[in-house]
Amino acid sequence: MSKIFKIIGYSWIYLNIGIFFYSIANIWIHSGFAKVQYILSPFNISNYVVTIVVFSPGFLFLWLSEKTK
């Protein structure tokens, strides 16, 4: 069970990283670099909230893989 949780956790994290880079490239192509700068601004608090919400299931699965060893 631990191995399954680890595979799901890493898959979730890598999938979200891929979607993140795809989205940034898509925004850059269609809206320009200024929009990318706006979205990735350190003062954009919603960026932090969305990142935590999106990546938390992956980290939860990795935590479960450690607890079920």
Image: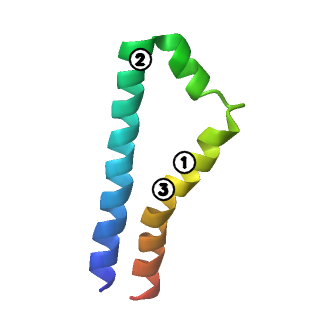
Vertical comparison of 48 with 33: above or below = below
| Residue designated by label 3 | 55
Q: Amino acid at mark 3?
A: Phe
User: Residue 49 at what x, y percent from top left?
Assistant: 62, 49
| Quadrant where the N terminus is found in the figure | bottom left
Mark 1, Cα crowd under 10 Å, few <14 / some 14-19 / many 20+, is few
Give amino acid for label 1.
Answer: Thr
Q: Which residue is mark 2?
A: 28
- Give the Cα distance between marks 2 and 3: 23 Å
In this rendering, the answer to whether 4 lies above or below 41 is below
* Dot 1 and dot 3 residues touching (CB under 8 Å): yes
Q: As rendered, which of 33 and 4 lies closer to the eye?
A: 33
**Which three-letter amino acid code belongs to the residue tagged 2?**
Trp
Residue 51, label in figure: 1
Q: Earlier in the sequence, mark 2 or mark 1?
A: 2
Provide the secondary structure element on which disc 1 rests: helix
